[in-house]
Image (cartoon, grey):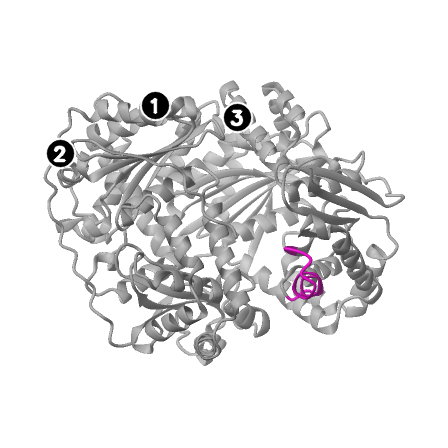
Amino acid sequence: MVTFPTPHIHRWSLPNGLGTLVQEDHSAPVASVQAWCEAGSILEGEHSGAGISHLLEHLLFKGTEKRGPNEIAQAVQDLGGYINAYTSFDRTVYWIDTPAKGAATAIDILADAMMNSTLPPEEFAKEQEVIRREFAMGADDPDRVASKLLFATAFREHPYRYPVIGHLDLFNRLTRDDVWAYYKARYVPNNLFFVITGAVDARQVYEQLAAFFAPYPRQPLPPVYIPREPAQWGRREVLHPFPTELTRLEMAWRVPELTHPDTPALDLLAILLGGGRSSRLYRALREKAGLVHSIGAWCYTPAQSGLFGVEALLDPPRRAEVEAAIAHELRELRETGVGGSELAKAKKQALAGQLGALTTTRGMAADLGGNWLLARNPHFTRDYLAALQLVTPADVARVLETYFEDRNLTLIALHPAGAETAAEAESAAVAEPPIHRFTLANGLRLLVREDPRLPLVSGVACFKAGLLAESEEANGITRLMARTLLKGTTTRSAEQIAEEIETLGGALGADAGNNSFNIAFRTMAPDVATGIALMADVLLHPTFPEAAVAREKEVQLASLKAEEEEPTSVARNLVRSALYAGHPYGLRSGGTPESVSGVTREALAAFHQRTTTGRNGVIAIFGDVCAQTVRAQVEAAFAELPAGEPLFEPAPQPPVLEQSVEVEATLDKTQAILMVGFRGASIYEPERLALEIIDEACSDLGSRFFIRIREKLGLAYFVGSSMVPGLAPGSFTFYLGTDPAKLEAVKAELLDEIRLLAEGGLSEEEFRRAKEKLLGQQALRNQSNGAFAHTCALDELYGLGFDEYRRLPEQMAALTREEVAAVARRYFHETPQVLAVVRPG
């Protein structure tokens, strides 16, 4: 039986009340330094509901008596570290992740901020405006609106009913003097504790903190009255109209606090009901009945009264049907009980999730800090998981009987305006905004979609690049270039770029794939011109600073090391290398340690000049905009972009795989991975759609592979398929993870299932379900203007046309099961394959 580790925790309390918890872990030369203040939204007293704790969090790093407004972030960057903070109901936590050699500096920075922040008045006004934009973004986000509405309805007396960010009208009344007084009252040694984990010396940490805090005496803490939430004696229901096309349903029952004896059983119940694709609600409502697009369950148990929730995303006409189905599943579980194997699976999921959270020093520190804050027991997680293992089916039945009554239920439904009933929802016709296409003088194509539902805008610029533009010597250069584009331009530093976009409440990022790279931004509608200008600046005027290039190379090399320790990644790279010998698709997406180390600043600049041209790119801007105005803004911003030529037209074709290949690797791991890879189709070939159907049918929990190999035979931990199309023929891979002792048996079963698929194709039920899921996933994906813009931009860039998404339903309707079977025979029957095995060394 897997047990939870019991690390040695060094714990001290200084004479002034400051707590210190240190967990030494010298397995990696890194550390996480965290300062926890017991100051959250439920502890704001006279300012309750104003969000003063969150506002103070924004201000605390804006300067101290010995560090200026930007010096804190710069000092952390000089360490090679990362700094951030968050505010919750009962805490505000500030943390720095750093190489171990920077731990002492990180401690000094956080201690200084806790005691000596100056909260500059000019920064106060700036951060107020930033948070007002957070309010606006939150008001436009249906998930946030639903969550706030749920807590405001479920709690009538307890300050959990207030959002952590506060209410805007109360927030606007806060003054800098209010925040200063709150800071001086709550940020005192006896209301703080430090948590440090990683490759540190506990005694040195203690001595440093003792020396720093010696001049700061214990202070009286102003009492904060927190009313106890009375019992709920009737169902509460709120149906809230919102500008959205789908209904978000939240059903929640009041449950006890974290330390209550019933909490372990409730947490396991959440996993049983909605913890993954094998959970009861997912299988019943999504996979079998097709009533929801997504569904899950959760249990939130803070230090005081908590909530057990079920959340679902669904079409508006089905709300009543979904509510009834959830109630039916709860009733059936209560009547029939939970089986021993099902409960054992939930316990393993809970243990694995908790252990997974401890793989980083930050995760260890967060766990240790939460244990101390909520239970004053640094080993609470260990004790809790021990209690979890003792939960019986009778315990699950008891909590179902105790808490899941209709009088204890709060129901929130966020739905499209005018969709209060299914009939009204079905009759509401929503006109889809058109996509405007422009071609600029330099060949750059621009797509604009006017969507006034929310005052938000998403934009993306995509350029052909990726593996097809790389060589073995320059492998990984696309990803490295994308990351370093944001590190400075001829007019802006990396810090200025980040500050400018984040002051608007927006975001700017970069990414790279097998065939392209992109720069994407998100802003509020009034700030779209700034978003376009920033995107143009990083694309047209990057400077690739030497220090930033070196730092990003270190990050990319670290990710390659992590990839080399992950069995599925190793197997995937083995398949790719053998399947595409001598072709760019045989290269690794992130490069190799040798190729990444050899990339110079000059090579990045040359690669950028080669790929970032008008005829090689597409920009898509979707949201609350005017198409003609955006066209003028983009034309002005990108006027100096050279026209250039589109890359790889046509794409280089990989050599024919003459015969099947077997490749193998060993890792110091306990599991084995088996993959069988075939040459697939390019995005231009008509067979691609049939392969997508086959992939969908072979990837879910109802697939023939999963049911036979995992469920019936118990030979695999996971099993599925993956299709990767490309501008050149892509790949189709079947994969599984297994016990090394079962490797030969499971290999025979997997190959047999592939043979049966190749000879007989899909069943009628597999075919129908896969088609429905592909159409449903497209509809869900295209809700987001950011995702929709990216899809349309890539389709246009690759020559499919930006409106390729419109053709999918028609193509799907025309595709027959016999055509899919023919594709299965062509690609998988007596076809050369790559069989890759990764086993323990």
Residue 121 seen anywhere in this rendered image of the structure: yes
Gap in angstroms between the C-alphas marked 2 and 1: 24 Å
Gap in angstroms between the C-alphas marked 3 and 1: 34 Å
Gap in angstroms between the C-alphas marked 3 and 2: 51 Å
Q: Residue at x 36, y 73 (%)?
A: 404
Q: Amino acid at mark 3?
A: Pro
Magenta stretch, residue numbers: 702-718
Q: Amino acid at mark 1?
A: Ala
> Nearer the N terminus, badge 2 or badge 1?
1
Tell me the residue that label 2 is attached to.
218
- Report the front residue among 67 and 464: 67
Q: Is residue 473 left or right of residue 236?
A: right
- Report the front residue among 689 and 221: 221
> Nearer the N terminus, badge 3 or badge 1?
1
In the rendered image, residue 793, in percent from the top left (x then y), is placed at 60, 47
Residue 665 shown in magenta: no
Write down the quadrant of residue 334 in the picture.
Answer: bottom left
Mark 3 residue crowding within 10 angstroms, few (<14) / some (14–19) / many (20+): many
Tell me the residue that label 1 is attached to.
104
